[in-house]
Amino acid sequence: MHIVVCVKQVPDSGQIRVHPVTNTIMRQGVPTIINPYDLFSLEEALRLRDKHGGEVTVVTMGPPMADQALRKCLTFGADRAVLLTDRFFAGSDTLATSYALGQLIEKVSATWGAPDIIFCGKQTIDGDTAQVGPGIAKRLNLLQLTYVQKIEDFDFDKKEITVHRRAEGGIQVLKTKLPCLVTMLEGTNEMRRGTMADALRAARAGIITWSAADAGITNLALCGLKGSPTIVKKVFAPPARAEKAFQIEVADKSYEDICDALLGEVYKRQPALEQDMVKMAPGY
Amino acid sequence: MVEKPKAPAAGNSRANTKKELPEHLKAYKHIWVMLELERGVVHPVSWELMGEGRKLADKLKVDLCGVVLGAPGTTDGAVADCFGYGGDVCYVVEHPSLSDYRNEPYTKVMTELVNKYQPETLLLGATNLGRDLAGSVATTLLTGLTADCTELDVDAEGSLAATRPTFGGSLLCTIFTLNYRPQMATMRPRVASVPLLTPGRTGRVIRHDVSLPEEDIITKILAFLPDGTTNKSNLAYADIVVSGGLGMQNADNYQLVRDLAGVLGAEWGGSRPLVQKGWIPTDRQIGQTGKTIRPRLYIAAGISGAIQHRVGVEGADLIVAINTDKNAPIFDFAHVGIVADATKVLPALTETFRKRLALAATRSAAE
Ligand SMILES: Cc1cc2nc3c(=O)[nH]c(=O)nc-3n(C[C@H](O)[C@H](O)[C@H](O)COP(=O)(O)OP(=O)(O)OC[C@H]3O[C@@H](n4cnc5c(N)ncnc54)[C@H](O)[C@@H]3O)c2cc1C
Ligand SMILES: Nc1ncnc2c1ncn2[C@@H]1O[C@H](COP(=O)(O)O)[C@@H](O)[C@H]1O
């Protein structure tokens, strides 16, 4: 069995700061991490491999430094890691990204065998679109199972997979044929630590690095900015509200008085609320 | 590399790109909203989109059209509401294979409809269904798709201007699909309000027949396991929400939030760190990566008001913030503030509300 997992290296956005004056992103020194959602998919891929045998290949498209993210995946136990990096990919939107990754996976298939499953994260924390997974599936003409909470059954001989997929108001139990593309929901599993042997292997292993040409991508018009139908025209900070909050007087006041004043203010601004609360709230 | 939004100072050369629509795309007209019909119910985000779509259609002087897919005989209610919520036209596709959402048949039908009727704009909810479908449809049509928008507008040239948070929500960006059609976007539930329903309002129904042999569809639905209703949050559609942040200091104090919510008949939630600490379940998180809410009253206790939290609550009619720091950013967008210790204010507030509501109840019973 061959499983491909798409991971992305992302800035740890918890640590991104916006310059207060220029409104630009201050990226210097912001550490990068593996997109946290991708780890749920990687772990699920490793579990399938451990149970059914085969290999897990992790792939990413990104700058040369994205090899750090791939090396980390090797320490978790992935068998092989491929980095697609080229200046032609700069500025890709989701359509162009799915094209490049689709082409990359074609090349991976030709080299190490066609994948039975491709895993993507539910979404990234920087792009945050959840589009690249479905995009790759379409590019490769594969079936897709998104927002998967649990792989209920996996029959490699029959090439069938049954999953629990999160839908509105409940769970869809879906069965489909391999090959297919799966995106896992967060919290479905916990990333393993990886063994000492994996760590040693990762330290020795090379990250396979391909340029666009190496991956057989010749139609550069479909890559990067050129291949991106969407255009970012404006980036801005959210506007401040005209006035600041009305402050309830607190100095030298008891909590009872503060709360009475607050209720007065709330009912003044939302006159119908009290009656509606009486109707809605239990026990009055 | 794939981080597409460039910071303004970096100067995005493409920001000055002009609209140059190829000839074959010039016929694309009208605004479409996908009406998500699942097990007999249309997701409210579809009506929220109809409200936003109506504004765009009026500006552009084009039709607002709903699109509803479902099993035979299940779409009538959705069609009537489509007009009631402002639609001029409703495209209807009924087929047994469309009874529950599946990516394959839905993608096939949506792309077929788009290619035949050529809408200029196609809007979907940023739900699991909408995001799953939109990505497949956009890639099949090779057009642009802007995900998780918080605001939709049209610019002077009549192009869709879709605004969404970027860089982990610290900034907003406005994205265009200038030279491809349709322009596609998904919008988060609850960033817009549901428009008023005008019962009896009618419009034109266009039925479209499709060939969808079930044996050609590989993915099968074996079962649907409905969620238990106990303890499930209804944050997005609650009238009153009480929430806590790290200022509540520990998991035990969080109970004070639930106490107040209990008295008000409100939903309870919190900021992201509380989910990360395990004080509250994931579906109780409010904000950019949690729920967007639009209650009539939102009470935030011990929450600083980071932008990722703010974007999830800005639609509230009345925001009350309790925070010990008078410079906390939450006071920039709250309507009423109390600079005090939330662990002290909350119990007092619960008591005050309890008394006042009991009084009001006696009064209304006496009337
Ligand atoms: C990609 C990304 C997505 C995110 N998504 C979300 C999201 O969806 N929702 C979300 O909420 N956050 C989100 N965040 C996190 C967000 O940036 C903030 O870190 C978070 O909202 C802060 O939570 P807080 O206000 O509870 O904590 P803090 O920022 O630590 O604020 C605590 C506040 O409590 C006040 N306080 C302390 N003691 C008391 C007291 N006794 N009484 C009253 N006040 C007191 C303090 O003055 C302070 O203002 C996201 C971050 C990233 C990077
Ligand atoms: N540059 C990339 N390299 C590899 N995988 C990616 C890349 N961008 C997105 N993905 C995959 O697609 C998923 C969804 O990304 P997004 O559409 O940006 O939210 C991610 O969780 C990854 O699995």
Image (cartoon, coloured by chain):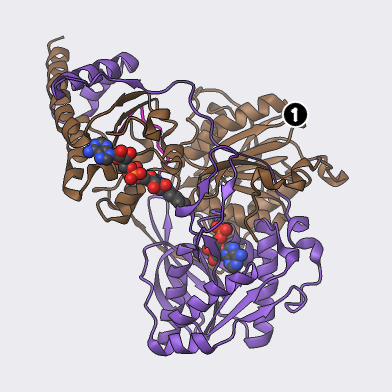
Chain colours: A purple, B brown
Q: Which type of secondary structure does the marked residue at label 1 adopt?
A: loop
The one of A126 and A33 positioned closer to us in this rendering: A33
Say which quarter of the image contains residue B172: top right
Residue B365's x, y, as percent?
A: 14, 15
Q: How many marks?
A: 1
Q: Would you place residue B154 above or below residue A208 in this image?
A: above
Residue A3's x, y, as percent?
A: 53, 80
User: Mark 1: is the Cβ under 8 angstroms from ligand 2?
Assistant: no
* Residue occupying the point 41% across, 35% down: B313
Residue A214 part of the magenta-drawn span:
no
Task: State which image quarter holds ligand 1.
Answer: top left
Q: Which residues are magenta?
A: B289-300
Residue B325's x, y, as percent?
A: 31, 33
Q: Report the magenta stretch's main SS.
A: loop
The one of B332 and B256 positioned closer to us in this rendering: B332
Residue identified by numbered label 1:
B156
Circle 1 Cα neighbour tier, 10 Å, few/some/many (<14 / 14–19 / ≥20): few
* Residue occupying the point 53% across, 28% down: B85
* Residue occupying the point 44% across, 79% down: A76
Q: Would you place residue A7 above or below residue B301 in this image?
A: below
Quarter in which the N terminus of chain B is drawn? bottom right
Q: Is residue B294 left or right of residue B92?
A: left
Amino acid type of the residue tagged 1 in the rendering: Ala
